[in-house]
Image: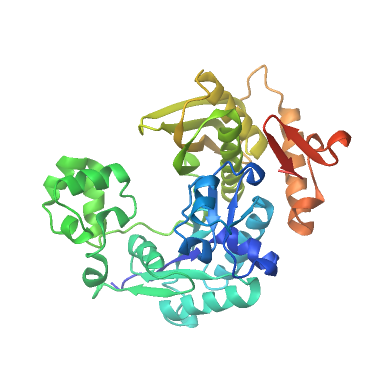
Amino acid sequence: MRDRVILHSDLNGFFASVEIMLDPRLSGKAVAVSGLTEERHGIVLAKSERAKSFGIKTGMTNGEAMRLCPELVLLRPHYDQYVKYSRLAREIYGRYTDLVEPYGIDECFLDVTGSGIFGSGKEIADKIRRDMREELGLTVSVGVSFNKVFAKLGSDMKKPDAVTVIGREDFKRKVWPMPVGDLLYCGRKSAALLESNMIKTIGDLACSDRDYITGLLGKSGDELWCYANGLDDKAVDPYKRDGSAKSLGHGVTCTEDISGKEEVGSVVRYLAEAVAHGLRENKMKAMGINLSTRDSMLKKHSRQAALSVPIRNPQDIAEKAMELFDKDGDTDKKLRSVTVTAIDLVPEDSQVQLSFFSDMEKTEKKERLFEAIDDIRMRFGREAVKTAAFFCRECSGELKLPGRKLQGSV
């Protein structure tokens, strides 16, 4: 049985790259996409290659990023444009295979095992890189391997605009020297526990006793041991059409703590946009919302709530998440990470038993409204539609909030 040919394609510095492509004056500059730029609050969501060279990382607060690079250009996110170019990128992938699995807005797995008419895995990866540069003005890094875990590792090895091939014959040489924390699905807690037991590289993990690793980490330890040995057999699942997904979440970890309803709210709204995008892509809606946070001591706290009607628009998702945040009582506590997750997913066309108090007509109207707004923004840009609440005659098109001033729309 021949090996599969799996690609993992990662759009380089996606948000920042889209901003630079749309405004060539930013080319060559240190650029970061973040929230609340006027007051230098919020966190970095994406950075350009030049910004990266100053040590700026995703999750840093704007203030910390500016200290590292005073010349940094901070930009508000234009999520409609990111969705647009994400879809265009997936159209390019679709030329080479119909087995495309989104892994976030800027990453995808592709199974090109049956796409030999276009060449080898590396040749297809190079063609995708060419198409992205010439048609979208964006770059991708692509990993090529015989399974998803190693393809993901490959795309991370060389950036930007590069292809890395990891074959069955050389994966031990290329993968095993890497830190164990680089292995897909090996979280920080698992990596720290393995390292405390002198298992510091992927090779150390692969060569350890399987039962010993399972004893340390449980079922996840057994899976990680298999991944380290190249035994990942998970299939590329295009858009999860089988409806098996039960939840869909998006989170961010900050390098400095955030606190207060305003800072947390800006992060939640960004995450809600990403979750809503994922729900649309997977043709699902949520019957519940979960908000998970970690405080400055990395203690996790999670709350969730069921919904009377299925939702997937970002406004409803953000509002429900912030309701959960308010229920904690201490809204000024310092947080290190925030995750918003849509739970209890149902297909968009499923018939759901509604409660007596639900207002399905109102929900459907709101859904149609957001779909229309998305369509207009996709065709004419984010500024084509703005929220009326962000305009007032007294402040000449600016919304003034206590201690903050936001330009234009959000």
- Write the residue at 68% across / 53% down: 80
Q: Is residue 341 above or below residue 231?
A: above
For the point 48% across and 42% down, which residue is it?
A: 251
Residue 241 point in image, percent of width and height: 52, 51
Residue 152 quadrant? bottom left
What residue appears at the point 37 percent right and 61 percent down from the top-left corner?
A: 148
Horizontally, is 96 left or right of 122 in the view?
right
User: Toward which corner of the image does residue 145 lie, by quadrant?
Assistant: bottom left
Quadrant of the drawing holding the N terminus: bottom left
Residue 25: image location, x then y, percent:
69, 68
Q: Taking the image as drawn, is residue 400 in sight?
A: yes
Q: Give the camera-side residue of 268 and 257.
A: 257
Q: Is residue 368 above or below residue 238?
A: above
Return the x and y of residue 342 as percentages of the image width and height. Answer: 53, 36
Residue 283 x %, y %: 60, 47
Q: Is residue 164 left or right of residue 81?
A: left
Residue 310 is at least partly visible in this image: no
Q: On the picture, is 177 further left or further right than 274?
A: left
Seen at 77% across and 58% down, the residue is 379
* Total numbered labels: 0
- The one nearer the camera, 41 or 277, is 41
Which one is in front, 58 or 135?
58
